[in-house]
Image (cartoon, helix red, strand yellow):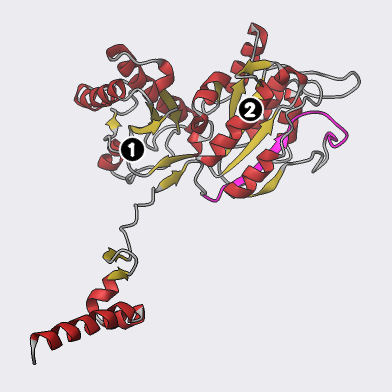
Amino acid sequence: MNSRTVQLLAALLAVLLFSMPSSSFARSKKSKAKRFDRKDWIWQPDAFPKEKKPQYIRMADNFFVFYDPSTAMTVPYRDGMTRLEMSKEVLLKSNASLPELNWQTGLYPHWKNVMWLPGAEKGFHPYYQLHNYNQEEFAAALEQLPVISSGPPMLQTALMKLENLLGLPGRTEVFMFTNGAASRFEGVDEPEPLAQAKKLAAKYDVCFTLISSATNQSAEKLLNDIAGVNDCSQVIDFDTVVEHPEHLFGRLYMPADSPFSNVLFAFDKAKVRKEYQQTLDRLGRYLTANQHEYAVLSGFCDIRGPQQYNIHLSRSRAESARKYLMDNFPLKKGRVLLYWHGSAKPVASNKTEEGRRLNRRVTITVRKGK
């Protein structure tokens, strides 16, 4: 066979290979892992390593959101938006960062209108009827929230509505946008907001998160008093959730893993021990070097002691860890946010001393800000 014939056969073989259906390559072991791209004559992998999906721990079983479309919320806020418009935007952004962990969820207005009948089982119109949380469905419900005022503020009305919603199994978190104003109608028998909050806290496993737009000391005091009905409730300034929308629903869950080790505490103590200061030092240096990130500190206890006492102690532990950071690093308070959960979600058995030691902790989560 002369060289001319060899060249012709080689050319014919190349043409046959080029025109061969891609299924023909499936018979070889190599073709199972790679795909032949005719366009640029480059071998490309069929599959890429999948990114590990984050794992989360659910910290509450149910949550309700009460939206305040009253005239008090239509005052100018920033960027050409009113507080009411910004409230809606915060909720949409918060929802976008929320994993789906099978909560029971509801979304409600808290104004007084023809749909509100005191004592009625369903005397109000929900935007999201109480059922399992679905991020896409909840976002669609949030889009329906009004940005035009619909009457006077009715803080006590929202608290009264809760009487017909609470009683679900497990802990319920209630998120309430309010400026602390409460209006009453003559001849209508309604409890004062603080009295109603105390009644609910005594009867149900409920925690209030009040997103405050209060503009005077009287309104601020009322909201702080409502948050004081138990140790799991809190007031969050409106500016904080605008700056960190994901912080609004953050206490509903926590990551299962963190690059920072836990800070452990002695029994019935909230002081940061010397051997754990290096963990907070590492966090402080990290936050100083990464100005667009912030930390969330979550306090916990072991199972010993009354529930309300443990919730208070877990809060003190988170506050103690934050104080250490603030005292030793140039950090603004808004870059170290707190949650507290009492003896919930133990990481070890409470039947052993070693397990209880591991449960007396503050966990550290770092999140990206704006």
Q: Is residue 6 above or below residue 138?
A: below
Q: Is residue 117 above or below residue 217?
A: below
Task: Spot the residue most to the right.
Answer: 187
Residue at image point 37% right, 36% down:
302
Residue at image point 58% right, 21% down:
238
Q: Main secondary structure of the magenta part?
A: loop
Q: Amino acid at mark 2?
A: Ser
Give the residue number, with chain letter if any, for mark 1. Answer: 359
Q: Is residue 228 magenta?
A: no
The secondary structure type at the circle numbered 2 is helix
The percent position of residue 279, horizontal first and vertical second, equals 24, 28
Graded by Cα atoms within 10 Å as few (under 14), some (14 to 19) or many (20 or more), the crowding at tag 2 reads many
The secondary structure type at the circle numbered 1 is helix
Could you tell me how far apart the alpha carbons at marks 2 and 1 are, in whole angstroms?
A: 36 Å
Task: Spot the residue most to the top.
Answer: 217
Q: In this rendered view, identify the residue nearer to me: 334 or 348.
A: 334
Q: In this rendered view, identify the residue nearer to me: 346 or 216.
A: 216
Graded by Cα atoms within 10 Å as few (under 14), some (14 to 19) or many (20 or more), the crowding at tag 1 reads many
Q: Amino acid at mark 1?
A: Asn
Q: Where the C terminus falls, by quadrant?
A: top left
Tell me the number on the disc at residue 264: none
Q: In this rendered view, identify the residue nearer to me: 3 or 317.
A: 3
Q: Is residue 103 magenta?
A: yes
Task: Specify whether residue 89 is in view.
Answer: yes
Q: Which residues are magenta?
A: 101-118
